[in-house]
Image (cartoon, grey):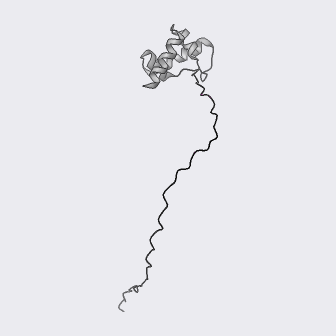
Amino acid sequence: MAKKKRIAGKRTVLVKKKSAAPKKKAAVKKKKSTKKSFSSPKISTQRLVIHTNDITKILGINIRTAQRLLQSIRESLGRNKKDYVSIKEFALYVHLGEEEVRQNLSETSLN
């Protein structure tokens, strides 16, 4: 017995042309209202804690050395492994002025 080939019948589908999209109106800027909004003064926040990346930038040491230094500061202060060290405590430990450290932090964070 010979097999018959199945041929799908051709479909003729009428495609409607889409009508042209309606033109959008030009955006009109609204005038600002005469009400004055009172904005709160910007509060400058200073960082309280220091991280290992900060120590590497300030002292120019390797990150692993900075981690060890931070750990020894925690041990001398009697802190746990995950506790934070403040900038003031760091400055006292490495015998630098707190303002020097803060100034250096702000300079390095901008770069």
Membership of 36 in magenta stretch: yes
User: Would you identify the image quadrant in which residue 12 lies?
Assistant: bottom left
Q: Quadrant of the N terminus?
A: bottom left
Question: Which contiguous range is marked in magenta?
Answer: 32-42
Q: Residue at x 53, y 17 (%)?
A: 70
Question: As drawn, is 68 to the left or to the right of 3?
Answer: right
Q: Nearer the viewer, residue 44 or 106?
A: 44
Q: Residue at x 45, y 79 (%)?
A: 16
Q: Nearer the viewer, residue 83 or 108?
A: 108
Question: As drawn, is 83 to the left or to the right of 29?
Answer: right
Please, which residue is most extreme toward the bottom here?
Answer: 1
Q: At which x and y percent is residue 59?
A: 44, 15
Q: Residue at x 49, y 21 (%)?
A: 106
Q: Nearer the viewer, residue 106 or 54?
A: 106
Please, which residue is most extreme toward the left here?
Answer: 2
Q: Quadrant of the C terminus?
A: top left
Membership of 39 in magenta stretch: yes
Q: Nearer the viewer, residue 103 or 28?
A: 28
Q: At which x and y percent is residue 66?
A: 48, 18
